[in-house]
Amino acid sequence: MADFQVDLNQLVTASAAWGDAGDKLGQAATRAQTIHDSHNEVVWGIFGPAWSTQVAAAAYLHDRLTEASNEAHAIRDVLVHVAKVYGAHDQDFAEAIKKLQAGM
C-alpha cells in the first residue's frame, strides 16, 4: 500500500487559495455583467451588430466566470471538509496514544 500523508496546514492553505480564486472569478463575472448591461440607451446605428456581438460575448464570459467561481468555491469547501476530518482523526489518534501511554 502506498505511503499517504496529509499536511493539514497545506490543506488549509490550498482551500484558502481556492476561495480567493473563486472570489476573483466572481469579481470578474460581475465586471463582465457590467459590459453586458452598459450603454443600453445608445442607438448604435451601423455599429449595432458589433455591439450586439460584444454584449453576447460579455454574457457568455459572465456565465463561464460564474461557473468557475462556483466550482472554485466547491473545491475550497471540499478541502476544508477534508482538513476537518483529518484533523479530527489526528486528534482522536493522539488522544488514544495518550491514554495508552498513561496506562503503561
Image: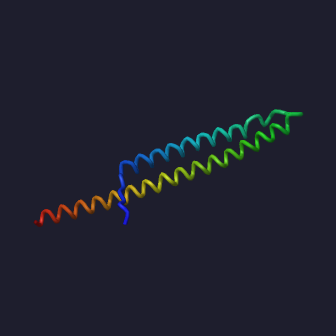
Residue at x 41%, y 46% (from the top left corner): 13
Image-based side of 100 in relation to 16, left or right: left
Image-based side of 2 in relation to 76, left or right: left
Residue at x 12%, y 66% (from the top left corner): 103
* Number of numbered discs on residues: 0
Q: What quarter of the picture does the C terminus occupy?
A: bottom left
Farthest residue, direction front: 1
x and y percent of residue 98 in the render? Answer: 18, 61
Residue at x 73%, y 40% (from the top left corner): 36
x and y percent of residue 15 in the render? Answer: 45, 49
Farthest residue, direction right: 46
Display colour scheme:
rainbow
Farthest residue, direction left: 104
Q: What quarter of the picture does the N terminus occupy?
A: bottom left
Query: Compared to 93, does 20 lie above or below?
Result: above
In front of the other: 81 or 13: 13
Image-based side of 19 in relation to 34, left or right: left
x and y percent of residue 26 in the render? Answer: 58, 44
Q: In the picture, residue 38 is in which quadrant?
A: top right
Residue at x 59%, y 49% (from the top left corner): 68
x and y percent of residue 33 in the render? Answer: 68, 41
Q: In the picture, residue 100 is in which quadrant?
A: bottom left
